[in-house]
């Protein structure tokens, strides 16, 4: 038996019929076509499926789609604006914070969540926070550098608006 859910995803109202066991990551990818959220371990270890639910970082393989009923979800597709990457995405490109790219959407979402919570993190805080996510390619140095660059860019952006 399926259940109808309705939620906001990347600012748009959407919904669908899901089975009680449907994972949120599968709903996003298979029913909404938002394949930027990747499926890695499906047991909460790798962070490839990281998204925001009501502003909080969530591993979408650990959440059922029915639990997201009525929530506001942001996926990697919701970060950029037409013609412009989000500063965190731009910093990952500038600092070569990716190689194969499989982990990248999750790292970008986790970094974005960190910088919303803590706009000026230390390297130790960045490393501790991003330990929720795994990368098999980069060795993490470039990812940490990308988060530092994004923090500076976002600070400049905030300053220019005040
Ligand atoms: S796929 Fe969700 S944490 Fe690995
Ligand atoms: S860039 Fe390949 S797993 Fe991170």
Image (spheres, helix red, strand yellow):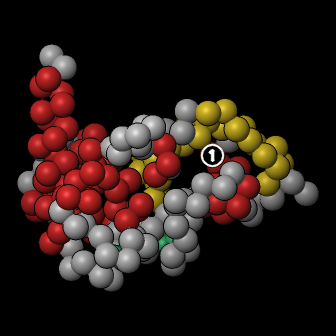
The x and y percentages for residue 160 are 14, 23
Going 54% across and 39% down the picture, which residue do you hit? 10
The answer to whether residue 44 is visible is no
| Quadrant assignment for the C terminus | top left
Q: 31 left or right of 61?
A: right
Q: Is residue 13 above or below residue 63?
A: above
The x and y percentages for residue 133 are 35, 69
Going 46% across and 47% down the picture, which residue do you hit? 52
Going 36% across and 41% down the picture, which residue do you hit? 84
Location of residue 98 by image quarter: bottom left
Q: Is residue 154 above or below residue 16?
A: above
Q: How many marks?
A: 1
List the single residue furthest toward the top: 162
Q: Is residue 91 above or below residue 104?
A: above
List the single residue furthest toward the right: 1
The x and y percentages for residue 72 are 55, 37
The answer to which of 53 and 74 lies nearer the viewer is 74
Q: Residues within 10 Å of mark 1 (few under 14, many from 20)?
A: some
Disc 1: residue Cβ within 8 A of ligand 1's nearest atom: no
| Quadrant assignment for the N terminus | bottom right
The answer to which of 123 and 90 lies nearer the viewer is 90
């Amino acid at each position: 038996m399926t259940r109808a859910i309705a939620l906001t995803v990347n600012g748009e109202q959407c919904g669908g019929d899901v089975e009680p066991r449907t994972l949120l990551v599968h709903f996003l990818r298979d029913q909404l076509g938002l394949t930027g959220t990747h499926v890695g371990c499906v047991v909460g270890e790798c962070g490839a499926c990281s998204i925001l639910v009501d502003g909080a970082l969530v591993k979408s393989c650990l959440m059922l789609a029915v639990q997201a009923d009525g929530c506001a979800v942001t996926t990697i597709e919701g970060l950029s604006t037409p013609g412009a990457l989000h500063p965190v995405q731009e910093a990952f490109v500038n600092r070569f914070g990716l190689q194969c790219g499989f982990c990248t959407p999750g790292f970008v979402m986790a970094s974005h969540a960190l910088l919303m919570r803590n706009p000026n993190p230390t390297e130790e805080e960045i490393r501790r926070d991003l330990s929720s996510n795994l990368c098999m390619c980069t060795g993490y140095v470039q990812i940490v550098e990308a988060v530092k660059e994004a923090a500076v860019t976002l600070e400049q952006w905030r300053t220019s608006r005040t």
